[in-house]
Image (cartoon, rainbow, N blue to C red):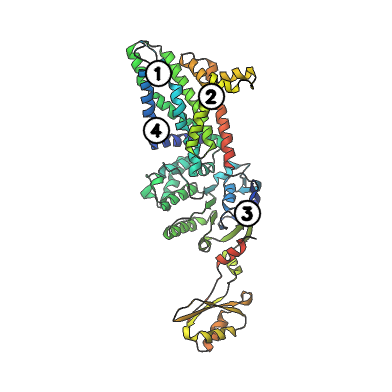
């Protein structure tokens, strides 16, 4: 735990040591605010909820989370610091978890910065704050899912641009796996039962349930297992790349 | 002497390329081993396996009795390793980097403070403590890398080309530092700068094509050099022919090589047969003929020559 804590603290401070953190937070706030008011019709709807706010999160995350995750391993490989880090008494799993936690906490900080919209909706009406809390939780879990995918892709390459593009593509597949566009790629050669399983694995589907205020254990378990499995794969990739 | 690093039959292949081929050696406390070899000889690969970054393909590495594969953390806890080019996190300041390393290594709060203060003092980092490492000069970056490698006072220190790319003053400083801390550690430095071996190493291991081709004291290596015990002689230019015939008559002189001279002096190198000592005989022979000697000295043999001989492609 000490090692994971040290790595998380270092990584988190690395975000704030560069303009990345501030650029990310500003863009996230501007986009989410703009979409909520102008596209989501937050005021015009006349409903005291944050659905117009949360419905855009998957789309924002699709591009913003890979930007947070792309540097996690690719940068270490590029600068050679991975050799420095992995020759300290640190296991690959500790490094993977420490880095992921830092990025996830960072996404959480960005999410906390959206609190004014929660305050706004409470000033304007009487929203169900339980629903909003569930949606925030769901949004953060979804960010974790996108992040773990981005971290895995980042570990595969020393090039951050490739890490970003690859992560966006991979996140898109995971996000949209329930949609016909992605399903049609599997239809015909995958057994129908597996087809519906792929649909159940959709990030979007699992988030939608949470964002409507239903904290269904299945959705939470889905995100946590996605993160868990992602971390295991991430660890394996880091170990594998170390030897090459 | 206590053996701190024990490398046995270490091998590593990358696909069809054999990078390290059956390398074995031990390093005891107090030794500074110069690990020499041309580029791509397997130096870095060997050091990476010792540091636990690469898994050994075959054979074993034990650090203070801990196997680097089975007991990786215990081994890594006793190693200080600086990879080639001393990579470190550019966004961190030297101080936060040292804090990060000591925290990962699990030093107690009191030890952390004491050790960090000590390496700051030893490597003269006081002035740059709070600046991001990426803004530092090459020399300071290297010092920060060294500080991170020695901050936990390791028994075994592995440095991959610690002086590469530094200016002569910085090289001198790094060498002085290594000599200071050498006493109670086992140190391996890889280099292809041979003067460095003469300056600080108590032992030299030369590897070529993944294999150890020499493991000896620097003096012994010099003794194996083709020019060992040759006599360098400089006389006035107009006495060249006389001096040459005087030296030729000395017993044990195999041949005389003319070196480039100038208008005032002629210079020779008298190479003995079987590296025998001919200095005195040459000096007497020349003096007896009434030739004034401008300069005479014994050549120790050049490490460069023996290095080239041992590592040239078979």
Establish whether labels 1 and 3 are both on one chain: no
x%, y% of residue B175?
A: 47, 58
Residue B296 in view, yes or no: yes
Q: Nearer the viewer, mark 3 or mark 2?
A: 2
Query: What residue is disc 4 on?
Result: A21
Could you tell me how far apart the alpha carbons at marks 3 and 2 are, in whole angstroms?
Answer: 46 Å
Left or right of residue B3: residue B287:
left
Helix, strand or loop under label 4? helix
Query: What residue is disc 2 on?
Result: A174
x%, y% of residue A125?
A: 34, 11
Query: What residue is disc 3 on?
Result: B210
Could you tell me how far apart the alpha carbons at marks 2 and 1 are, in whole angstroms?
Answer: 22 Å
Residue A150 in view, yes or no: no
**At x 55% / y 47%, what residue is drawn?**
B78
**Dot 4 crowding, Cα within 10 Å, few <14, some 14–19, many 20+:** some
Q: Nearer the viewer, mark 1 or mark 3?
A: 1
x%, y% of residue B157?
A: 53, 51
Viewer-nearest residue: A155 or A164? A164
Establish whether labels 4 and 1 are both on one chain: yes
Helix, strand or loop under label 2? helix
x%, y% of residue A61?
A: 45, 25
**Dot 1 crowding, Cα within 10 Å, few <14, some 14–19, many 20+:** many
Establish whether labels 4 and 2 are both on one chain: yes
- The numbered mark at residue A53 is 1
User: Outermost residue, left direction?
Assistant: A123
Q: Is residue A158 above or below residue B238?
A: above
Helix, strand or loop under label 3? loop
Chain name for mark 4? A
Q: Is residue B165 above or below residue A237?
A: below
């Amino acid at each position: 735990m000490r090692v994971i804590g040290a790595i998380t603290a270092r990584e988190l401070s690395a975000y704030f040591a560069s303009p990345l953190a501030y650029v990310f937070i500003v863009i996230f706030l501007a986009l989410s605010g703009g979409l909520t008011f102008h596209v989501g019709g937050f005021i015009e709807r006349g409903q005291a909820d944050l659905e117009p706010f949360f419905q855009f999160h998957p789309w924002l995350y699709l591009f913003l989370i890979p930007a947070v995750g792309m540097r996690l391993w690719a940068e270490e490989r590029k600068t050679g610091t991975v050799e420095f880090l992995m020759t300290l008494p640190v296991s690959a799993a500790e490094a993977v978890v420490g880095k992921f936690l830092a990025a996830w906490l960072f996404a959480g900080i960005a999410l906390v910065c959206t609190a004014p919209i929660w305050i706004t909706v409470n000033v304007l009406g009487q929203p169900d704050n339980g629903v909003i809390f569930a949606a925030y939780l769901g949004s953060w879990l979804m960010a974790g899912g996108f992040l773990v995918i981005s971290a895995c892709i980042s570990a595969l390459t020393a090039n951050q641009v490739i890490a970003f593009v690859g992560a966006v593509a991979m996140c898109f597949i995971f996000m949209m796996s329930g949609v016909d566009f992605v399903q049609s790629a599997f239809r015909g050669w995958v057994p129908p039962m597996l087809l519906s399983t792929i649909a159940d694995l959709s990030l979007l589907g699992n988030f939608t349930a949470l964002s409507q205020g239903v904290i269904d254990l299945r959705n939470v378990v889905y995100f946590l297992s996605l993160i868990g499995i992602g971390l295991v794969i991430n660890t394996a990739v880091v170990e594998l790349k170390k030897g090459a | 002497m206590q053996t701190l690093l024990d490398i046995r039959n270490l091998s590593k292949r990358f696909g069809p390329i054999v990078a390290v081929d059956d390398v074995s050696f031990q390093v005891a406390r107090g030794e500074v081993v110069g690990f020499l070899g041309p580029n791509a000889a397997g130096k870095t690969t060997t050091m990476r396996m010792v540091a636990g970054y690469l898994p050994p393909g075959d054979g074993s590495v034990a650090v203070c009795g801990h196997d680097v594969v089975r007991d990786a953390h215990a081994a890594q806890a006793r190693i200080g390793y600086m990879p080639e080019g001393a990579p470190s996190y550019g966004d961190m300041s030297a101080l936060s980097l040292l804090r990060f390393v000591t925290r990962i290594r699990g030093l107690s709060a009191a030890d952390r403070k004491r050790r960090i203060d000590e390496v700051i003092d030893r490597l003269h980092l006081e002035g740059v403590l709070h600046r991001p490492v990426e803004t530092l000069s090459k020399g300071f970056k290297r010092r920060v890398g060294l500080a991170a490698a020695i901050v936990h006072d390791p028994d075994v220190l592995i440095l991959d080309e610690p002086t590469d790319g530094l200016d002569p003053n910085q090289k001198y400083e790094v060498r002085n530092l290594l000599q200071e801390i050498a006493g109670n550690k086992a140190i391996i430095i890889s280099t292809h700068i041979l003067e460095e071996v003469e300056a600080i190493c108590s032992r030299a291991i030369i590897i070529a094509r993944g294999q150890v081709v020499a493991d000896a004291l620097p003096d012994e290596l010099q003794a194996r050099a083709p020019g060992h015990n040759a006599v360098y002689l400089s006389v006035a230019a107009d006495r060249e022919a006389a001096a040459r015939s005087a030296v030729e008559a000395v017993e044990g002189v195999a041949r005389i090589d003319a070196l480039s001279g100038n208008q005032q002096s002629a210079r020779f190198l008298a190479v003995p047969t079987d590296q025998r000592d001919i200095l005195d005989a040459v000096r007497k022979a020349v003096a007896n003929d009434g030739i004034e000697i401008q300069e005479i000295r014994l050549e120790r043999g050049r490490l460069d020559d023996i290095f080239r001989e041992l590592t040239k492609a078979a």
